[in-house]
């Protein structure tokens, strides 16, 4: 299983970014996926998740600003990030659990300037 995220970058407060994560090595449409974030010295925390059927869940502080979606034809999960704030600055990781093992991509850096 491999995950490759992209789409991070530097953006001003109030701006938007769309993260993408392409997966390979499994039957993509059989699994839910999630996005996590982590800053140096802090524990990795869950941000959003999407089920095989498209049901979504978000941590409170991104509710209404971030949207997770998936395109099974492209083996890709997205995280649309709107109204970004400096507090959203972190490295973002996509993740999938397959056969009881959690896999992580290398992450993509999001930096929001004030």
Image (cartoon, helix red, strand yellow):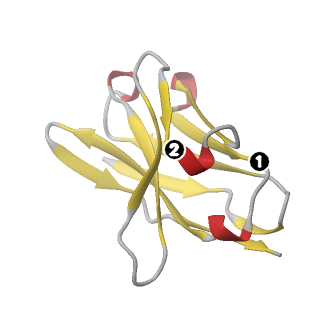
Residue at 31% across, 34% down: 26
Q: Position of residue 19 (x, y in %)?
A: 64, 50
- In terms of image quadrants, where is residue 65? top right
Residue at 37% across, 31% down: 32
Mark in front: 2 vs 1:
1
Check the image and report above or below for 71 versus 65. above
- In terms of image quadrants, where is residue 63? top right
Mark 1 element type = loop
Q: Badges 2 and 1: C-beta atoms under 8 Å apart?
A: no
Split into 4 quadrants, where in the image is the C terminus?
Answer: bottom right
Residue at 38% across, 49% down: 95
As measured in the structure, the alpha-carbon distance from the residue carrying label 2 to the one carrying label 1 is 21 Å
Mark 2 element type = strand
Q: Position of residue 68 (x, y in %)?
A: 58, 36
Q: Residue furthest top?
A: 53
Query: If you read the primary sequence from the N terminus, does the residue marked by circle 2 or circle 1 appear first?
Result: 2
Q: Nearer the viewer, residue 114 or 91?
A: 114
Query: What residue is pinned by disc 2?
Result: 22
Q: Nearer the viewer, residue 2 or 43?
A: 43
Residue 19 vs residue 51: left or right?
right
Q: Residue furthest front?
A: 60
Residue at 40% across, 41% down: 24
Q: Position of residue 99 (x, y in %)?
A: 15, 36
Q: Residues within 10 Å of mark 1 (few under 14, many from 20)?
A: some
Query: What residue is pinned by disc 1?
Result: 82
Q: Position of residue 3 (x, y in %)?
A: 42, 51
Residue 2 vs residue 39: left or right?
left
């Amino acid at each position: 299983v491999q995950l490759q995220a992209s789409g991070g970058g530097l953006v001003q407060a109030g701006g938007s970014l769309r993260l993408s994560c392409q997966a390979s090595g499994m039957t993509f449409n059989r699994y839910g996926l999630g996005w996590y974030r982590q800053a140096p010295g802090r524990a990795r925390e869950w941000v959003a998740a999407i089920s095989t059927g498209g049901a979504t869940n978000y941590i409170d502080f991104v509710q209404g600003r971030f949207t997770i979606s998936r395109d099974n034809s492209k083996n890709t999960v997205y995280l649309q990030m709107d109204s970004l704030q400096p507090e959203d600055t972190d490295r973002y990781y996509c993740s999938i659990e397959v056969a009881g093992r959690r896999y992580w991509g290398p992450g993509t850096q999001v930096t929001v300037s004030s």
